[in-house]
Image (tube, rainbow, N blue to C red):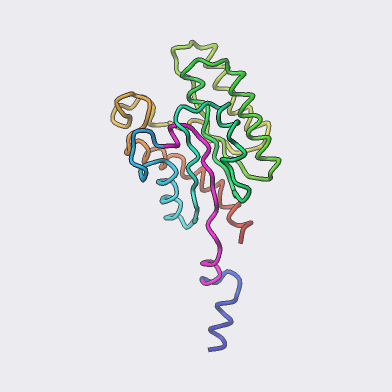
Amino acid sequence: MVIGMLSMMMPGSGARAQETPPLKVVVLGDSLTAGYGLPADAAFPVKLQKALDAKGIRTDMINAGVSGDTASGGLERLDWSVPPDADAVIVELGANDALRGTDPKVPRKALDEIIKRLKARNIPVLLAGMLAPPNYGPDYAREFNAIYPDLAKQYDVPLYPFFLDGVATVSGLNQADGLHPTAAGVDRVVANILPSVEAFLRPVAGQKR
């Protein structure tokens, strides 16, 4: 009986592992995060949480997605969207800036400030990149697309290059507007980004134990 009690108290035991609270992860984004046109349980953060749980990484995903939001909008609500006890943040912003043809300097400045503030709060960041649509021409695309790798390098944060990789322009994976993923599209996004999120969160989880 005593041996059994001691084993339950040993570091790394199953009982101790169960006591570790889930990571509080905020997904700061736009309609792609919010789950536009989908049931609440089909939104990206919900499905990502389930996928991570299956990998043994317990999370409490906070859906801080606002449909129509720009990078500047995400910056304006950053302080109240990311609570003081957040363990990590996935930043998914910029798609609406690209769709509107906004000067790339504007989302670059906003994303720069978002990452800078989160780093100042010692909150790990995973940056999810976006690509500009082709209709604004190659010069615009070149300047816009460079935002994410540049900032990831500048602040030494992990980058998932294109949030909609394998989903954008695929008719069967997008809603009628051609912009927002269907539930199956979200599944594809989650499957594609999962290895990057897992690599991002495992060290964070290790520090929390």
Q: Is residue 172 left or right of residue 28?
A: left
Rendered residue at 47%/58% (across/down): 56
Q: What stretch is highlighted in magenta?
A: 15-34
Rendered residue at 52%/57% (across/down): 22
Classify residue 10 by image quadrant.
Answer: bottom right
Rendered residue at 60%/57% (across/down): 206
Classify residue 117 by image quadrant.
Answer: top right
**Which residue ends up furthest to the bottom in the rendered image?**
1
Q: In this view, does 197 lie to the left or right of 151?
A: left
Q: Tell me how many marks there are.
A: 0
Q: Is residue 72 depicted above or below 24 in this figure?
A: above
x, y percentage for residue 47?
A: 40, 46
Q: Is residue 135 depicted above or below 12 in this figure?
A: above
Q: Is residue 156 depicted above or below 139 in this figure?
A: below
x, y percentage for residue 176?
A: 29, 25
Give the quarter of the figure containing the C terminus. Answer: bottom right
